[in-house]
Image (cartoon, grey):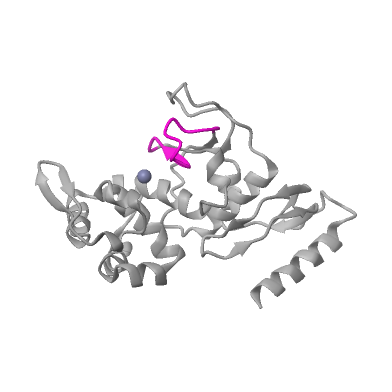
Amino acid sequence: MRVCFLLFVGFFSIFANAASPNGCGKGQHWVKPHPRRAYYRGDGTYVRATDVTGHCHANPPGYDVWNNKLMTGRPLSWHKEEKTATWTDEERERILEALGDLPAALKDEGIDGIYRLMRAIDPANPASNNFNSIVVYDSAFNKDYNLAHVLGHELSHRLYGSLSEREKDSFRISGKWRLTKPKTYEVGRPKNEFLRPNGMLSPEEDFCDIVPTYFLQPEKLKSLSPRVFNWVNNHIKLWSLK
Ligand SMILES: [Zn+2]
């Protein structure tokens, strides 16, 4: 039903604005014609590949802030081995839609920019961050990755860094991380309670997989690990990135 409604709105806006590509209304932006690959939205909805026609599109939440943060070049002092890439129309639309799927609690406007590089030194990474900037690589736009989760993961690193040690301890206890030697933690809960193997690397990686899933696919997290779901649910009100 929702899909039909969106299709209807999409067709209507294409028809209404076909004659005046720059005449989009308030709260809309012009999308140039471009081929779009298939992908998954933040909530897991499949979106098929298509040739997008030029149309006025409703701005997703946060569009005005984040559209100005899609940067060219590379962050300061970034690895020289990673080459810069150019944003395509498809990628800009995808990134801004994915950010729109994420809650305000994760969209820290203190991020100075989102940069587009080609391939990570570690090719398993679809994105990376240096706390102030986020970098997205070619692979982030493949169907294998859910872009809203990818961005939510990187933004959660910044959120984790802003938590007090007491708050981090509380998370580690909830996630059953075991302190084996100073600042070294081992997995203490069953492996099938992790969203993906990456979460088993450290409490911080675990946190950064869990938090976006809490917002984007809450039922999935609740059934996988009710204990960590409840922890996020109880603590989200305390978090502030200001
Ligand atoms: Zn990470």
- Report if residue 26 is visible in the image: no
User: Toward the viewer: 156 or 124?
Assistant: 124
Look at the image and give the residue range highlighted in magenta. 117-131
In the image, residue 224 sits, relative to residue 79, either above or below, namely below
User: Toward the viewer: 24 or 119?
Assistant: 119
Quadrant the N terminus occupies:
bottom right
Which image quadrant shows ligand 1? top left
The residue lying furthest to the bottom in this view is 1
The residue lying furthest to the left in this view is 181
Residue 123 location (% of width, % of height): 46, 36
The answer to if 155 sits in the magenta stretch is no
Q: From the viewer's perspective, is 64 left or right of 50?
A: left
Residue 240 location (% of width, % of height): 34, 54
In the image, residue 121 sits, relative to residue 110, either above or below, namely above
Residue 131 location (% of width, % of height): 38, 38
Q: Residue shown at 60%/45% (left/top)?
A: 67
In the image, residue 116 sits, relative to residue 170, either above or below, namely above
Q: From the viewer's perspective, is 132 left or right of 167?
A: right
Q: Residue shown at 43%/24% (left/top)?
A: 79
Q: Would you say the magenta stretch is mainly helix, strand or loop?
A: loop
- Report if residue 168 is visible in the image: yes
